Amino acid sequence: MNTLIVLASSSPVRINLLRNAGIKFNSIPPYLDEISIKKSMLSEGASALEIADSLAEAKARKISKKREDAFVIGCDQVLEFKGELLSKPINQADAQTCLMKMSGNWHKLFSAIVVFENQKPVWRHIEESRLLMHKISREYLINYIQRNWEHIKHSVGSYCIEEEGIRLFSKLEGDYFSILGLPLLHLLSYMSLRGVISR
């Protein structure tokens, strides 16, 4: 059980999820140009699911080149709203536009994990979730963004459901951990099966 585990991410949410599960690991951010990768894949007609999977793989591959001896976990999450991919907000005005657009509507989250060992992908999983947002007043959204900006500016869709953002929603369909950006139960099951962690 002495396998070196590396999370190819600096996401505080993903780090906390793994840490709270009692996993000992290192966190190394991969620093990819995700915007360029998304644009390139969209121009080729790639789906949101394919983009999430490709970004997770690219992150794991980059860190695996540096740490060949490690069990490297790459993750990514893509939000699809009516066929459009929505990203992290550029500023508070962008967050307001995004949330007003989704207000009263369903959207989808695709959360992908790809594991690398010895610079090769050995396992992958993608989870799809659906979320229905209340019809939210502009005044509440403006105040919500101002109160929570330091956290939501790092979040796809401009919300964090583990915090006040849960008040934006009337229905969630999918695994809670996947909605947060890490299909944790599937990952832990694989890690246990491989003997990377004990059960």
Image (cartoon, rainbow, N blue to C red):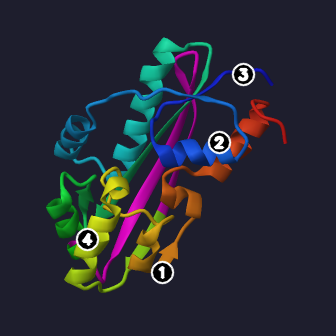
Residue 53 position in % (x across, y down):
42, 42
Give the spatial CA distance, label 1 vs label 3: 39 Å
Q: Residue at the spot x=39%, y=46% of the render?
A: 52
How would you rate the neighbour count of disc 4 (Cα within 10 Å): few for under 14, some for 14-19, many for 20 or more? many
- Is residue 54 shown above or below 128? above
Foreground residue, 168 or 65? 168
Q: Is residue 125 visible?
A: no
How would you rate the neighbour count of disc 2 (Cα within 10 Å): few for under 14, some for 14-19, many for 20 or more? few
* Kind of element beneath mark 1: strand
Give the spatial CA distance, label 4 vs label 2: 30 Å
* Kind of element beneath mark 3: loop
- What residue sits right under mark 1 in the picture? 171
Residue 37 position in % (x across, y down):
25, 36
Residue 146 position in % (x across, y down):
26, 66
Residue farthest toward the front in the current orientation of the protein: 147
- Is residue 66 shown above or below 109? above
Is disc 1 in contact with disc 3, using a CB cutoff of under 8 Å? no
Q: Amino acid at mark 2?
A: Arg
Q: Is residue 112 magenta?
A: yes
- What residue sits right under mark 2 in the picture? 19
Residue 195 position in % (x across, y down):
79, 31
* Kind of element beneath mark 4: helix
First in residue order: circle 3 vs circle 2: 3
Q: Amino acid at mark 1?
A: Lys
Q: Amino acid at mark 3?
A: Thr
- What residue sits right under mark 3 in the picture? 3
Q: Is residue 184 magenta?
A: no
Magenta-drawn segment: 101-128
Position of 59 with respect to 87 (left or right) is: right
Q: Residue at the spot x=58%, y=15% of the render?
A: 118
Numbered mark located on residue 99 in the image: 4
- Is residue 4 shown above or below 74? above
